[in-house]
Image: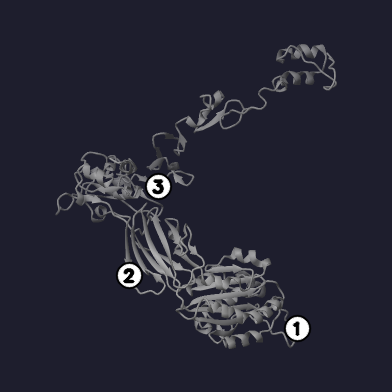
Amino acid sequence: MSLSLCSADNRCLSSLISTCEDCLRRSPECAWCSQEKFLDGAHVSQRCGSVSDLRVRGCEEAFIENPNVKVEVNATISSSQVSPREINIDLRPGGEAMFVIEVQQLERYPVDLYYLVDVSASMQDNLDRLKTAGLALSHQMKEHSSDFRVGFGSFVDKPVSPYIDVHPSKNDYEVHCRPAHGFIHVLPVTQNMTEFTRVIQEQRISGNMDTPEGGFDAMLQAAVCQKDIGWRPEAKHLLLVMTDQPSHLALDSKLAGIVVPHDGRCHLEDNIYSQTTTMEHPTIAQLAEKLLENSVYSIFAVDQVQYQWYEVISLPNMSLGVSSYRNQSKLLSDVEVQIGLEDAHAQRFRVNVTAFCPNGSTVSGSTKCSSVQPRQTVFFKVTVGMSWCPAENGDQDVLMSVRPVGFNESVTVRIRQICGCGCTETGCCHDDPDPSPCPAETAVCRADRSEPVCSGRGTCKCGTCVCDSSRLGNIYGKFCEMDDFSCPYVKGLVCGGHGQCVSGECVCLPGWTGETCDCPVSTESCVSDDGLICSGWGKCVCGKCVCDDSRRSGALCEKCPICDSSCQSHWSCVNCHLSNGLGSDAYQLCNHSCAASSVEYVDDITGTYSTKH
């Protein structure tokens, strides 16, 4: 027998195993024998073992419960950049499945870039630079995509107090200044670069009172108003946000008496955001959701001072740069994937991605390749593992997505959780291919005559307890007498992970003791280098040294900085003399407590000592 097989058999052997589900959850190598007379008289846990071990012990192949990990690829769905588009996986607890997806950069893949620019007064210099560099940048972007379009919109802040000054004297705007606004959609995405240049040249600054701007308000409208913006369904959507300030957040709106939560919908009337003074700013989570729903990749071009603020925000599909133009062309040459999995399942599933880049590099745990040229392909090896089954709804499929950032195509991964066994699903398991109905025997389902059937927490079927389900946790055991929720927890584990919960009390595994099974019986952790328990100065209690002498410390009672101090050892004598005076009577009175023959009193410890008694 090989070493790996021995290891598998060891993992599958445990007295805690009482059902097929317990066995399958033990390890991916474990299988269960449902043959009725298999090892008749032996403990039920002996039905669990490796497939080869069960065969050797006489279990027939038809009765071996051993669901395997399976990966099925649906290649019927057409794709231009991402393949495959659909994958089905069968996973059991402890199992792992691996698949590979391909992402190709197409030369003519369409790209839509929408400029969303803060036109508050402090952005004057940035706006001037955009007027001179915007056209050159657009030509540069065409080197990366031959089907490139560009649009434009502007924002400032909510045009109400205290964000702007509403005093009548401030209503007469100068010729070169425009009124504050929440969001104005100026130019839908277009191939007409002459029109784009004209629009940029016409832009003028505005003004407001406070430092933050209404960027997130405008971003949500730019993301959800797809028809107005002109986002093409087949294009990569890039939203470039240029600002020199942070953005207002949801609750900030209450300063202006605006308390209606944002509904996440498009509200453009005549290309102007109509609800800017009636609805709150969106929450970060709401904005993130809408960006993902509409496959919008946000690029923040901000001043160095605000870089950290936007870095903390960390929206999905987000790129951040100090320069207004640095990251745009680079973004088109990056290929990165994101894993989408509901939070309710995130803890039970582990996902690892390894990117195989066109330049030959392979990085485990990396989800990104840079400097990818058109017609080059990036391969991503994705490994998915399931740690445990849910307490409820274990038969429901779990959906996971693998989405290349900024692409409108993704891979849908459907995970079928194999959490049950065919035997328990069909009732009794018999050698007879056409069994007769099971007798209603309940005596064998009682731990004791005085105990209720299946401990009152299950149903007796064919002489076997089928335990009830509970929202609190798992109920198991031959008589449903065990669970994982009614006993004390230590470090998040019932019975410290070193025992089983039986009728509300911890029954410890060998080598452990205590009410919560968190104390090791062994004293090995208390043995010092000289072979003594706690250096001979203490007792081993629950795997830790408890020192007999309060002066001692350390994990093994090995530390005692004052034990060898003569002052400390003679302190009772010195204290006696100091408390009773310096005469001969005091000497006689305190002599019995003195460890030394006499005590000398000195005037000065730096010179010759002189006695005073």
Q: Which residue is mark 2?
A: 75
Q: CB under 8 Å between callouts 2 and 1? A: no
Q: Nearer the viewer, residue 300 or 65?
A: 300
- Callout 2: few (<14), some (14-19), or many (20+) C-alpha neighbours within 10 Å? few
Amino acid on which disc 3 is placed: Asp
* Residue receiving disc 1: 170
The answer to whether 576 appears left or right of 551 in the picture is right
Quadrant of the drawing holding the C terminus: top right
The residue at the point 15 percent across, 53 percent down is 433
**Dot 1 amino acid type:** Lys
Whether residue 411 is situated above or below residue 108 in the rendered picture = above
Point out residue 6 in the picture as x, y percentages from the top left corner. Answer: 31, 41
| Secondary structure found at label 1 | helix
Disc 1 packing (10 Å; few <14; some 14–19; many ≥20): few
In the rendered structure, which disc, 3 or 2, sits on the residue that comes first in sequence? 2
Give the quarter of the figure containing the N terminus: top left
State whether residue 87 appears in this view.
yes
Q: CA distance from mark 3 to mark 2?
A: 43 Å
Amino acid under disc 2: Ala
Q: Is residue 211 left or right of residue 263?
A: right
Q: Name the residue beneath numbered marker 3.
A: 484
Q: Mark 2 falls on what kind of element? A: loop
